[in-house]
Amino acid sequence: MGGGLLLLSLLASKVGGRLGLPGLLLFVIIGMLAGTDGLGGIAFENYEITQFVGIVALAFILFTGGLETSWRTTRPVLWTGISLATLGVVLTTGLVGVAAHYLFGLPWVVAFLLGAIVAPTDASAVFSVLKERALGLKGHIRPVLEFESGINDPTAVVLVIGLTEIATHPDTPLLSVLGEFATEMVLGGVFGIVLGRLAVRLINRINLPLDGLYSVLTVAIVAAIYGVTSAVHGSGLLAIYIAGVVLGNSEFVHKRSLRHFHEGLTYLLEVGMFLLLGLLVFPRQLPEVAVPALLLAAVLVLIARPAAVFVSLLATRMPAAHKAMIAWVGLRGAVPVVLATFPLLAGVPGASLLFNVAFFLVLVSILVQGTSLPFVARWLKVNAPLSAHTVMPLEYTPTGAGKNDLIEVTVPTASGVVGTRIMDLGLPPDALIVLIYREQQYVIPRGTTPLHAGDVLQILAARPAAEMVQARVNASGPLPSGSS
């Protein structure tokens, strides 16, 4: 039955792409149709399993997001992302909490608890929807979105746990919640950096007998980093993301194949998690909260999120249109539903209402924001073409100790090397052009092969030599005579 649902979800994702619908929305709908109120009649109401699966899935999703995060593009937006992930989450919590208090008549603590549940943007939703929509964005919009969604979950987790504690034990001091937040964030950051660097050394030095065991090793590393950090009361999720960034920006053996493995694993976990959430929800209960939940969704999307973004980014020089796009791409996914299981398991009064409202808001966010991203990007004039990615047949597995790497360089139209034979380029002796991709054909390079504009060159070289080749290829004007 699980295999059938997974196959159905994969087929639905292809159909959804053609219809312009996010795959995550279709996964949830399939889960709802297979559940107790749907055609499948699968009875499932285990919030503990849902919470466990959600946290495990989120850990691997964040790790994969970290692997794909380029520090070169993230470093300029570091403090912007941190501001959104902390101040932005707190502001969203407050504004949504005030609205929830008046719309649902909830006590203030429970209302703010609902605000904290739906405050974070979801890494799986942001990563997957941006990939599905193949949406290019100007400036630093995409790095900010990916970095924010990767590090804002710990803030929301601490807020939800702290407010749940206050709701069940009203004598809990607020300062203890703030202290716990500071402790978790600091320890999560430190452990993420330290354990990430140790993971790089371990992967490069362990020398496993089978290549496939390196995938098992990285799974163990993710589990260990999360477990160790959580055991000392740090944020395991933050540590996992930061460790992923450290690994993704370091050289280690089988890096490309391991990234492919975790990309597939993340997709599997996303499908499974959203299917599980769909099974957990009883659609017949949703109409009871539909009207106030729609109003709360409007407050979240149109007021709370934009206000949090613009206030958090007051100190930046980012254009208003870019900030507006960041506000609109604040997608909610599985994280709010997983967070809603904490008050349910703790026995907070009215927790079932919080769960249904959070699920409703997730559906609205994915349906409205997820499907409208290309239109809003064009309307705000922040869309940009994505650079075409050429799939090259040759792969290079660095040993981790060597200095060579296989890089790809595209020959610009105005390059001075256009029409020049490879033997006349004067390449460094430790740089070798091993393959050329030209007009959808692969060309085996020879010394007499001339370079054309648009050629994609695969070059095996040490880093200094590679940088020299890139500079020579990108330079306009004729080559200097006697270059070597």
Image (spheres, grey):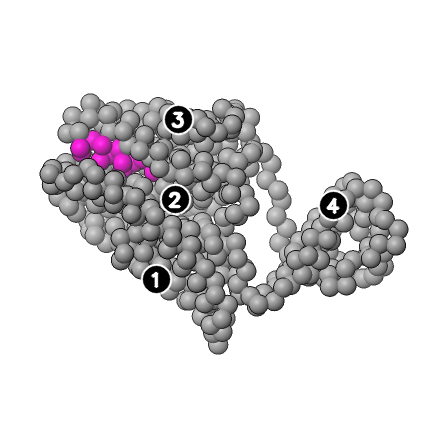
Residue 342 falls in image quadrant: top left
Q: Earlier in the sequence, mark 3 or mark 2?
A: 2
For discs 3 and 4, the disc positioned in front in the rendered view: 3
Where the C terminus falls, by quadrant?
bottom right
Q: Position of residue 195 (x, y in %)?
A: 40, 59
The part of the chain drawn in magenta is: 109-120
CA gap, disc 1 and disc 4: 44 Å
**Residue drawn at the location 35% of the way across and 23% of the way down:** 303
Residue 147 falls in image quadrant: top left
- Depth check: 2 or 342 in front? 342
**Residue drawn at the location 45% of the way across and 59% of the way down:** 197
Q: Earlier in the sequence, mark 4 or mark 2?
A: 2
Q: Earlier in the sequence, mark 2 or mark 1?
A: 2
Residue 77 shown left or right of residue 89 in the figure:
right
Q: Secondary structure at mark 1?
A: helix
Residue linked to disc 1:
224
